Amino acid sequence: MLAGIALLAVLAIVVAVAVAAGSSPDDRPGPSSAGNAPREPQSLPVDGQEDGVDLEEEPTIAATESVDPEETALSALRELNSQDQPTVPLEGQYAAQLASKTVGIVDPNQIAANGSHTFYAQDILAEHNRLRQEFTDEARVVLLLSTDYGRQQLYEGQPLWVTFALLPDSSREEVAAWCARQFRSVSAAALENQCVPRRLNPLGTSTN
């Protein structure tokens, strides 16, 4: 009886081995496809998109301010006047008037930068700066308004920008002689438009 049991056990082992040998590897359970299925790449929002919705990008407009050269020149003239005016005493002394203009004035004896005889703020500033540099070693050149002294003269309702060369302790004759020396090539008639003695009187009094 024991021999029969042993024989049955051996047969059972042989059968198990045969079944195992005949099974295909493809029949074995593999890892769960749910946990290892390839993940589809997530689309990240790009510029102008959010969650797949296109966002219109606000156009950016550079703020550009146009600079008016006339306003720039007027600002420079005002600045020069604000610096010079407090430094000029009004004591009736004579000074050499080198230029006297207001914006839009027509001077038939001079030509502006635009090729005409009409002077604008840029032309007035350029003329003053040229005179300031030209006579820096001869006299102190300042910029006043015609309303800063004397009768407060106006031209067509506007004050004039006046360039003066200040000559210390000078009489009318001495200023006239200085003008003649500085503008030797200018005729006597033209000199009246180029360099002329003027009195810097207190406000409300004559300038002659």
Image: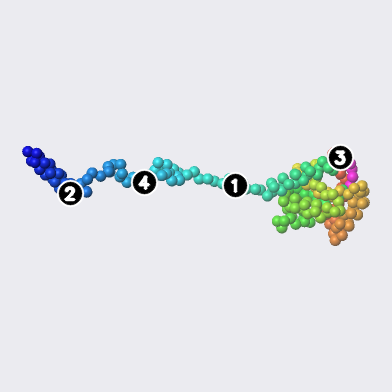
Q: Which residue is mark 1?
A: 64
- Mark 4 touches mark 3? (CB < 8 Å): no
In percent of the image, x 79 and y 56: which residue is there?
109
Identify residue type, mark 4.
Pro
Q: Position of residue 62 (x, y in %)?
A: 56, 46
Q: Which range of residues does the magenta coloring cover? A: 89-94
Q: Position of residue 51 (x, y in %)?
A: 40, 41
In percent of the image, x 60 and y 47: which residue is there?
64
The answer to which of marks 3 and 1 sits earlier in the sequence is 1
In the rendering, which numbered label is found on residue 41? 4
The answer to which of marks 3 and 2 sits earlier in the sequence is 2
The answer to which of marks 4 and 3 sits earlier in the sequence is 4
Can residue 128 be seen here? The reply is yes
Can residue 104 be seen here? The reply is no
In the rendering, which numbered label is found on residue 189? none
In percent of the image, x 91 and y 54: which residue is there?
177
Furthest-front residue in view? 2
Crowding near the residue tagged with mark 2, few <14, some 14–19, many ≥20 C-alpha atoms within 10 Å: few
In percent of the image, x 77 and y 52: which residue is there?
129
Question: Taking 176 as reference, is 42 left or right?
Answer: left
